[in-house]
Image (cartoon, helix red, strand yellow):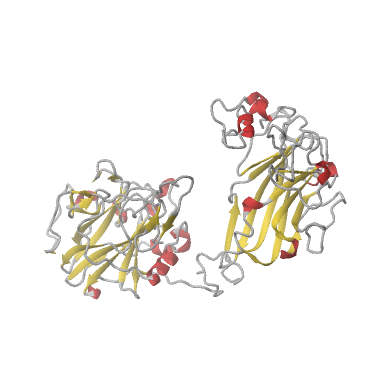
Amino acid sequence: MGLIRNAKAVINGSSVIGTIGGDAGFSGDIVANNEQEEAPAIDATTGRSITGRGTTTKYDYMGLYDLSGRPLYLTLISDVISSSLLSFINTSLPEAKPVPTYHPDYLNAGAVNDINIVKKADVWVTFVSEGAGYYNTLGYYTYPTNDPPATQADIDSIHIMLPNASLSGSGGAMRSGDKVYLGRFNPGVSVGFVLLQNAWSPISRAVNTSAPKFFTHDELNTTETSTSMKRHAVLLYDNVNKLFLTGFEDQTRSTGSSDNDFNDLIFYTSSNPVEAISRESVNPIDKPTDTDADGVTDVYDKFPADPARAYIQYYPAESIWGTLSFEDLWPSTGDYDLNDMVVGYRYKYIKNALNNTVEMYGDYTIRAIGATFINGFGVQLPVASSKVKTVTGQKLIANYISTNANGTEAGQTNAVIIPFDDTRALYPSGGFTNVVDGTTYMYGDTAHVYIGFTTPLTSTELAAGTYNPFLISNQRRGYEVHLAGLKPTDKADKTLLGTMQDNSSTASNKYYLSAQNWPWALSFVEGFDYPAETNNVSEGYLNFLTWAQSGGTQKADWYKDIAGYRNNNYIFHK
């Protein structure tokens, strides 16, 4: 919380260097716009009492603002957002943690969401952060505490406080701690807030008052069809920092598009005297708890009772599997359909509080078998075998793989894991599978491999992009088929390099490429629509040869389903 989430950056050459955070909110190549624009001004300094309401709501700006929608009427001295407040916010309204699940009490019907003035007081609102993809606008309105508005039309005026409530570097120019003086209010007056969804226009540099609105009054949120979904703001009292924190949810909750974390816009209200705002029926802000004392609060700790574990990370993603596609006749190119073995993979990392990996899981499944050979599959990790404590879950049925006591393959300098040594371990029926159009699509088993480490490994030591997966051809341990440019393992038969169509050269550090730059294996961090049986990959993918012959510099998106890129007659279809 307190950091921009949607940053724009300038690309200098081939790199981007940016820092998110710090006094200015960002630095380096992160960019923002902050020019000036005039708007009608109002006097917000006099005491206000509520005398009545009309039937048509008027909108006004509190003063001038710049071209990014940042007010020019901010107080001269901004607030400093304390680390304690940020920790309270991250505990109370954590990102992507739905309030109905983690803090259902915030949504109780009796919980107060407005600022109720009980003593004459000066009142300020301080911007803290936002986590929205929209250009949201924040306004406020006032009413007699004992006579709240029943409809939107009951509100006399809505005062635009923050025309563009977007952080600097994230579509706006707001900074954490920016503070607005609302005015002096008499007892018996209440202040409500309204978020105008995506109402700021960076083109016209004005607020669209016809935009969808979410109020701190549940009854006014007419865009929601369900009564239980009408709440779009929560109010929390912080007894340490003596302030009232408001968090808004800016998506319609009843449509399923909302993440319900109520932190799309966060600000707080303060007063002088501090006791001028009623605390009655206001929920207290939550304080962080760290049960296992590992430095990660429970709300973010996936293992709150385990000091050795804190986070879970996936590669490519929790719901996305990568794909490896092999030609198994290396060093011959064979029919070059690259479907002899198609493997889906996903990694799950268990990390400690320092973000170092304690253990990992590799899930491997076979998508297709387009070969008469009985092939195996291995992965070389970029760490020594001695750094692995234990490996379990491998499916070894062919008796040609020797393992160390820790489960890694014997005779290897770096840790080599063999998820399966025979495709029949996952597809017992064997034979051609999922490569001939018109046949029944088959689903096989999955090898769930666990790898524990002797000591936690840094992200640099265990970077997923440095793994070296390979096919073992027809149970011949020396026949390894790797991705282009990756070296064979210690167990490979090096005399095969540079024979037949393979143009590998150890002197040139060139591996597993033909003279035409054709690879024997492909890797994707997503799915891949591989060729049907006996169809050369270049027949189905019309830009493949351009990509290969250019060394990957041209048509890097050759495998995408883009008009003119494919001949679907040569690609396998489920």
State the image quarter where residue 89 is shown.
bottom left
Percent across and percent down for residue 544 are 63, 31
The image position of residue 229, as x and y in percent, is 39, 52
Q: Residue furthest right?
A: 399
Residue 58 is left or right of residue 280, and the answer is left
- Marker count (numbered): 0
Q: Is residue 205 left or right of residue 314?
A: left
Task: Say if residue 155 shows up in the picture.
Answer: no
Residue 243: image quadrant is: bottom left
Q: Is residue 400 above or below residue 100?
A: above
For the point 25% across and 59% down, which residue is it? 192
Quadrant showing the N terminus: bottom left
Which is nearer the eye, 19 or 423?
Answer: 19
57 sits to left or right of 306 = left
Can residue 559 be seen from the camera position used here?
yes
- State left or right for residue 351 relative to residue 406: left
Vertical placement of 87 versus 148: above or below?
below
Q: Percent from the top left, x then y, of residue 211?
A: 29, 44
Q: Residue furthest front?
A: 507
Quarter of the rendering occupied by the C terminus: top right
- Choose between 511 and 224: the one closer to the eye: 511
Q: Give 423 or 139, whichever is nearer the viewer.
A: 423
- In the image, is residue 242 above or below residue 133? below
The spot of residue 149 in percent (x, y) is 22, 55
